[in-house]
Amino acid sequence: MQKFERHQGLVAPLDRANVDTDLIIPKQFLKSIKRTGFGVNLFDELRYLDEGYPGQDVSKRPLNPGFVLNQDRYQGASILLARRNFGCGSSREHAPWALADFGFRVVIAPSFADIFYNNSFKNGILLITLDEETVDRLFKAVEANEGYSLDIDLEHQRIVTPEGELIEFSVDGFRKHCLLEGLDDIGLTLQDEPAIRSFEQRHREARPWLFRQAP
Amino acid sequence: MAGQTLYDKLWSQHLVKERDDGTALIYIDRQLLHEVTSPQAFEGLRLAGRKPWRLDANLATPDHNVPTTLAERAEGNTGIKDPVSLIQVQTLDDNCEAFGIEEFRINDARQGIVHVVGPEQGATLPGMTVVCGDSHTATHGAFAALSHGIGTSEVEHVLATQCLLAQKMKNMQVRVEGKLGTGVTAKDIVLAVIGRIGTAGGTGYAIEFAGSAIRELSMEGRMTVCNMAIEAGARVGLIGVDDTTIEYLRNRPFAPSGEQWDAAVANWRNLVSDDDAVFDKVVEIDASEIEPQVSWGTSPEMVTGISGEVPDPAEAPDETVQRSYVRALEYMGLAPKQRITDIRLDKVFIGSCTNGRIEDLREAAKVAKGKKVADSIKLAMVVPGSGLVKRQAEAEGLDKLFLEAGFEWREPGCSMCLAMNADKLEPGEHCASTSNRNFEGRQGYGGRTHLVSPAMAAAAAIAGHFVDVRQFADVAPVQEA
């Protein structure tokens, strides 16, 4: 996984609550058996005016000029500012894959759905939860100032605004550690193999019916 | 010390290790796999040179991409016309074969939607931890199994380590007391709960559904309720074990038998919250006040009773909600204060992991019996949740009853719940659907989904618009325009 230490980037505002993972990446693109290539279809139904399908030449598709990521001032954005309950619905990891593939490293919102939260950190995307008031203030600042960018410092858990304001955020220790070091979860867990084996042995003795072979 | 909740018990029974920061490794007893969220996980194992930790913990079946017409299914995988879908289903077959994982392939009678197949096989048991790369894994909580919907990286993690990295959630109890009215079902309970607490109301919680109305439900009904816990934001939905749970599991293929059955049952009886358990949050709902529900918007929380109307955005509680309402009404093509019974429909879908079980089909069939689908309905389809559900329904003659009424009778799969196969809505079409999500584009680009119970969907198919299934006999069908 890509390490995340400090990131400065342009902010794009997506002013909409309850953005679900179907909206982030529609189902027809879930047929891929790869982890990459989803970026061109990120927010497909908002971004294009026609219906998308896998394998299409997206350069020929009509863009929705009203959609924020199509506007000149937000080209190259790597920080997404969003509203409450971002990432709800389906567990598809294709959602963070699409966000990362498009170039987003950070999403800031008042709240995130649980499964999406887990999936994002496993793909090197930092999700920052801030209170509604602060998020609202950031929306206003982004809309008022072209080229508005934020400096995200994971180590010290703070955001530095262009005005020099410091906004602190919290993130749990384990996820922070994995992001900072770019660690692979599976490798880490396998260091606990003896503990898993001994648990499994006790569990099997206590509840043998959970270990039946398929009929 | 206060007693334990069911969730607390299941958590501590599977806790392998807890780190200082609260991150824990929990042992996983069962992983269900399907074709959409597993290929990258198997690929990851291969790239790292890893093997599955415990093969017999896994069970796979293709469901999302499979076609549902008999003609296509007769040809097996080669009947899948979409080449990208075909690759995905073929990849699941290849991976299961290469790694030695039990799979019910496309035309196995036991194939179906993973969340229908697991329980009907007894592959989901009380006291288990169950995971699947699918958010509707919450379904299995109906059996007092701690079940998590997970992402593909986690699917790979569980394959490789038999463990899930997790943090303990908070406990919420949703208590539904009293008696449901005639024609009001498990689907209406859960839609009413989501309408009350919102799609983020359960975020960070494991929700246990309790109360007399929940105890009265069959296992099918309980699965419907737990299935949609995720639509309230909760990864985990749970219901304690009772006789209904145990009787459902007796003699299922993967369930224990003989002495082991007796030992298991004695153990399962403890899988309930203690009387003095403390929940972080309790929500109480009076079952007798629940009407048949219909969703009007693009989020499952945008739901109301059949006697209700579409809300007026001007009356929304705050600006963010107001914008969501305006956007939802525009997308759905509905007007503020429009009566729910005035919503005309184009298609009807009965099926999915929420409502594709035998009891759901019986409820719909009861309404459709001897009647005809309205001429204005372009397609009304019934898609059984599994091959075994289909077989049972046919043994009861439900297929004939549906066909005579003008419904299509299909082969099992996820179908139009998420429209990854050919079953989908066209732009602007309104659909009465027994599925679980009414998100924009969910059932097809520009499609407009209304979530309802199977009985309400069947009644809507006959009438051509939403009707109160409780007074259905009195409602005349709409004339074709």
Image (cartoon, coloured by chain):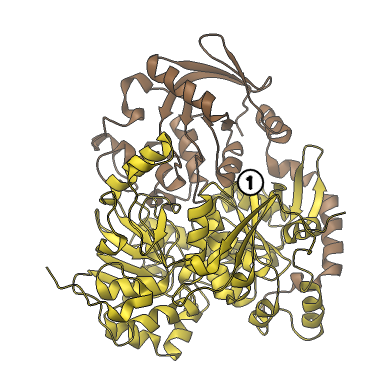
Chain colours: A brown, B yellow
Q: Chain of mark 1?
A: B
Q: Which residue corresponds to the image point at 42% horizontal and 25% vertical from the top-left?
A: A12
x and y percent of residue B249 in the render? 66, 79
* Image: B376 above or below A134: below
Q: Is residue A134 left or right of residue B293?
A: right
Assign the N terminus of chain B to one quadrant of the image.
Answer: bottom right
x and y percent of residue B184 in the render? 46, 72
Please tell me how crowded label 1 is: few (under 14), some (14-19), or many (20+) other residues with Cα within 10 Å.
many
Q: Quadrant of residue A166?
A: top right
Is B440 or B58 nearer to us in this picture? B440
Q: Is residue B337 something that shows in the picture?
A: yes
Q: Is residue B9 left or right of residue A36?
A: right
The residue to which callout 1 is attached is B204
* Image: B108 above or below A75: below
Q: Residue furthest left?
A: B481
Q: Which residue corresponds to the image point at 57% horizontal and 32% vertical from the top-left?
A: A127
